[in-house]
Image (cartoon, rainbow, N blue to C red):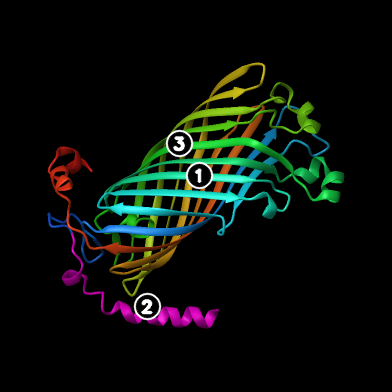
Amino acid sequence: MQKFLFIFFILFTTAISAQTNTDAQVVIEKKARKWDTLKYQKFERALIVGLYQQYRTFNIDFEQTINRDTLNLSSHTYSTEIDFSGAGGIVINYDKFQLSISQGINPPSTAGGKGHTNVFGLGLSVGDNRWVSETYFKRFKGFYNSTTPNFDSSNYNQTKQYYLQPSMVTSLFMTRFMRFRNHEKYSYKAGFGCNYRQLKSAASFIWGGSFSVFDLKNDSAIIPQKARFLYNDYSNMKGIRSVNLSANIGIAATIVIFKAWFIGGYFTIGPEQQWRNYNLTTSYRTISYIGWSGTGRVSFGLNMKRFYMIWAIARDYNVYNSTKVSATTSSYTANTTFGWRFKNKTPKFYEKFMKTKIYSYL
């Protein structure tokens, strides 16, 4: 395997010499460039299509602080997991717009006692090198309790079957805005998009914010029967909805080798105002709270004139704490993307759109 990767590295690095003269070969924006073209370049009006395989997990950690727990029954983690063989998607990019669609299914026969999981994702990214707005929707159905041995060890030791919640559904709608302080030299989309190419290493501070709606639903109580006595009023909780508004700061950086190989990453964190609604089966409880949210991503790969491949890892989390019951959501995503940039003439309707004020704001 190491020999193969070494040969692969040499072949592609050698091929780069035919593509590094980007001033002559890569078509970039015809209007005045507001960035350092020695640092990164943009592929103008190219239709970019990529296919990717995906590994995804989503966890919800519950913890009660109402009663003293001597039996270790307070903590419960519900999880989903989709491996690379079960999840994939497509990404399409043109100019300042990028659309992605993903779907994943983990069949019961290969779940190892973890049940059936279905994942769907839809994303839209708008913006350029100055700022980016990312809007996406994620949905997970079918969870297993990874802490089953803590409250049902006898059954788990015999069957290796986790406590399942096949009807549990979580969804997240989010719109995230990021503004890059050093956008003249650093391109976010070179490492996490399709239509930019970072030529020299650079970094930038980030500031921005997000609006999101998190929804958790189940057809019965979420907490297992043996642990409900600890949760008091929340023992029969079967749903949470939280409308969130956050402000974030962070930092991003990309290291480039031979003007094509790269490794990049960014991290943001900030306070989040949360308006929550708990479904307690027989009643509802509304809480306004300030929590925390953050995002961390790492990507590495090869970005050439036409062909690109990106390995990316993303980590997202939200904290929904209170004085009685806390819930923390976290997701882990690993993507392997291969794409190609097709030469394309600008459609007439898009030429008209480029002349509008709306486009100038993008």
Q: Which mark is residue 71?
A: none
Which residue is painted at 20% across and 67% down in the image? 26
Alpha-carbon neighbours of circle 2 within 10 Å: few (<14), some, or many (≥20)? some
Instruction: First in sequence, mark 3 or 2: give its number.
Output: 2
User: What secondary structure do most residues of the magenta stretch adopt?
Assistant: helix
Between the residue at mark 3 and the residue at mark 1, the CA separation in whole angstroms equals 12 Å
Q: Quadrant of the N terminus?
A: bottom right
Q: Nearer the viewer, residue 58 or 94?
A: 94
Estimate the x, y position of residue 66 in percent, counting from the top left: 72, 27
Q: What residue type is disc 3 on? A: Phe
Residue beneath disc 3: 173
Q: Which mark is residue 120?
A: 1
Between the residue at mark 3 and the residue at mark 2, the CA separation in whole angstroms equals 39 Å
Between the residue at mark 1 and the residue at mark 2, the CA separation in whole angstroms equals 34 Å
Element type at mark 2:
helix
Q: Can residue 186 be seen at all in this image of the molecule? A: no
Estimate the x, y position of residue 275 in percent, counting from the top left: 50, 25
